[in-house]
Amino acid sequence: MVKGLFAAAVLFVAALSARADTLVGYWDLNENLNRNAGTSGSLAVEVIGLGIQYVGWGTGSDKNLVEGYPVGQSLQFTNLATVAEVGHITLSNLNFTNLVNPVITFAAKSNPGFELSDTFTIDYWNGSQWVSSKLDKPTTSYEVITHPFRAGELDGVANASIRISFSTVAAVVDTMNIDNIQVNAVPEPGTLALAGIGMVGAFVLWRRRR
């Protein structure tokens, strides 16, 4: 009887662990750059260019919103008569210790006027340089952008940095809104196994005492 219960407990813990997810950092960007939830991370914004650029607050979105937080404002980047512009939203001090498979998600939209060219990327710091993955620029309606990092890129990194980057060349007018930034990861298999063994051991001890 105990063996059967032990096996059932192992299967239960394995199934539960497979769905485990850790919110490492969350920013609702409601007129502030402070982290709202999660376990780590700080956010900074930088825009440089030749022309008229400014960063302010725009209309927020309910997409990618963490439950319990209100829809508010978004971070809005605007440029006018810009020859060249480069912008970064940098997330630093992210702690992925004992975590794997990091994923960054956020709501975004873009309203470009005339522009010669642009790029939109997700970057991570590998210890010596930024490594970029090119993404399609957001559309004129809010959509959720999802970027999973490949195995080994940030797994277990205790002080990771990720950034959302964009650049524009020869733009008459262009706006971009970013909202509800989330960074998630899952516990590494070894950590899950130890937790599972502890739970199963406690369960078996409880059964024997009964």
Image: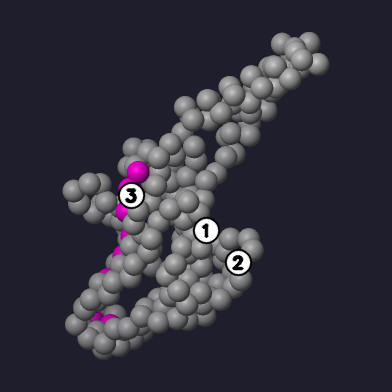
> Which is more toward the observer, 108 or 65?
65
What residue would you read off at disc 2? 69
Image point (47%, 77%), residue name: 31
- Residue 150 appears at what percent x and percent y? 37, 42
Per the image, label 2 sits on a secondary structure element best described as loop
Magenta highlight on residue 129: no
Q: Residue at x 58, y 22 (%)?
A: 197
- Earlier residue among tags 1 and 2: 1
Q: Report the residue at 78% width, 11% height from top.
A: 1
Secondary structure beneath dot 1 equals strand
Closer to the camera in the image, 132 or 24: 24
Q: Of the residues tagged 1 and 3, which is closer to the observer? A: 1
The amino acid sitting under disc 3 is Ala
- Which disc is residue 160 wearing? 3
Comes first in the chain, label 3 or label 2: 2
Nearer the observer, 53 or 66: 66
Q: Is residue 153 visible to us here? A: yes
Main SS class of the magenta portion in the image: strand
Quadrant position of residue 116: bottom left
Q: Which residue is mark 1?
A: 37
Q: Secondary structure at mark 3?
A: strand
Q: CA distance from mark 1 to mark 2?
A: 10 Å
Region in magenta = 158-172
Left or right of 105: which side holds 47?
left
Residue 71 at x, y = what percent? 59, 73
Asked if the residue at tag 2 contacts the one at tag 1, i.e. Cβ–Cβ closer than 8 Å, the answer is: yes
Q: Is residue 122 above or below residue 54?
A: above
Snapshot quadrant of residue 15:
top right
Residue drawn where x is 63% and y is 34% of the image: 16
Task: Specify whether 115 is left or right of 196.
Answer: left
